[in-house]
Amino acid sequence: MSGEWPNISDLMVAAGEAAPIGLLGVPLAAGSVTAGRCDLAPGMLRAVLRRIGRYDVESQRELASRIADRGNVAIEGMTIEQATGPVRAAVAASVAAHALTLVIGGNNAVTRPAVLGLGLALEEVGLVTLDAHFDMRSTAEGLGNGNPVRALIEDGLPGRNIAQVGLASFANSGTMHRDALAAGNLVVTAGEVRREGIAAAIERALAHVAHCRAIVVDCDIDVIDRSQFPGAPGARPGGMAIGDFFAAVRMLAAEPKVRVIDLTEWDPPLDPSDLSALTAGRWLAEVLAGFETRR
């Protein structure tokens, strides 16, 4: 315990100890559209947690859920194709042991093995993305951080099981947009979030995947406006407001069907300040706050 400053690091326990939440680092950098050091993010997140308090003044509750740190998957030097098996197995082991698994990337290519790690038929799995991008680039030249959604559709994940929130103008192609709609994905743009509110957007997303047995949430951090998260290489001006992002994460984590939530595309060296690190730490606090309201 941290005395007068109880913080999230107090809740971290060793792998193997009883905990409702498991945390898994997946330091994948291979195959990124923009070269960088997303592999450094899991370590940076762990380090910042001592600066994130546990008391929520809004709800007047103190976070208490223990988090088992399952370490990093050993994928150094691997391609995405090579890393898929180990990541999938690590996620499967965590899902078997915990009500919720947090997958800390690494780039957005970790989302596909996170979905596959549930071990369910893809017709039973829902995917909700908070992302500025469709992630529907072609897979013809292999897997990358720009095509996990298309790869999952090609694996057999139906579009009726995919809800995408926060899509940004001038950051996608018309072909990707048309392909997402043709597949049956729910598409909620950044503009719709601003006009209708984040609560309505997340309610639409959860309604779209309500028929699914289990849900994976992909938090690609570049959905946030770049001024509020400069450590994301794919972020652009005009992205989701940070308060909306936090509200969305809390709402999604409150849904009992959500078994896996990932955090991807954070490249720590891009931000010489501590803004991005503190935002990522707050993300984890919002996940816990939502999780603790589950019925």
Image (spheres, grey):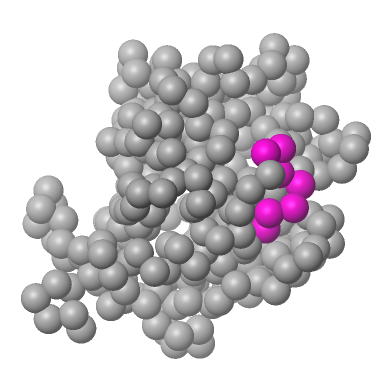
Quarter of the image for the C terminus: give it.
bottom left
- Does residue 30 show up magenta in the picture? yes
Instruction: Residue 194: name its quadrant.
Output: top left
* Residue 245 sits above or below residue 283 on the image: above
Pinpoint residue 221: horizontal percent, then vertical percent.
Answer: 48, 42
Specify whether 173 is left or right of 203: right
Q: List the single residue furthest toward the front.
A: 272
Residue at image position (35%, 36%) is 228
* Residue 291 sits above or below residue 17 on the image: above
- Does residue 151 show up magenta in the picture? no
Pinpoint residue 45: horizontal percent, then vertical percent.
Answer: 43, 62
Pinpoint residue 215: horizontal percent, then vertical percent.
Answer: 55, 49
* Residue 241 sits above or below residue 127 on the image: above
Residue 285 visible in the shown view: yes
Pinpoint residue 46: horizontal percent, then vertical percent.
Answer: 42, 68
Instruction: Identify the main secondary structure in magenta.
Output: loop
Quarter of the image for the N terminus: give it.
bottom left
Front residue (pair 139, 214): 139
Front residue (pair 201, 55): 55
Specify whether 28 is left or right of 288: right
Q: Count the labels in the image.
A: 0
Give the magenta range.
28-34
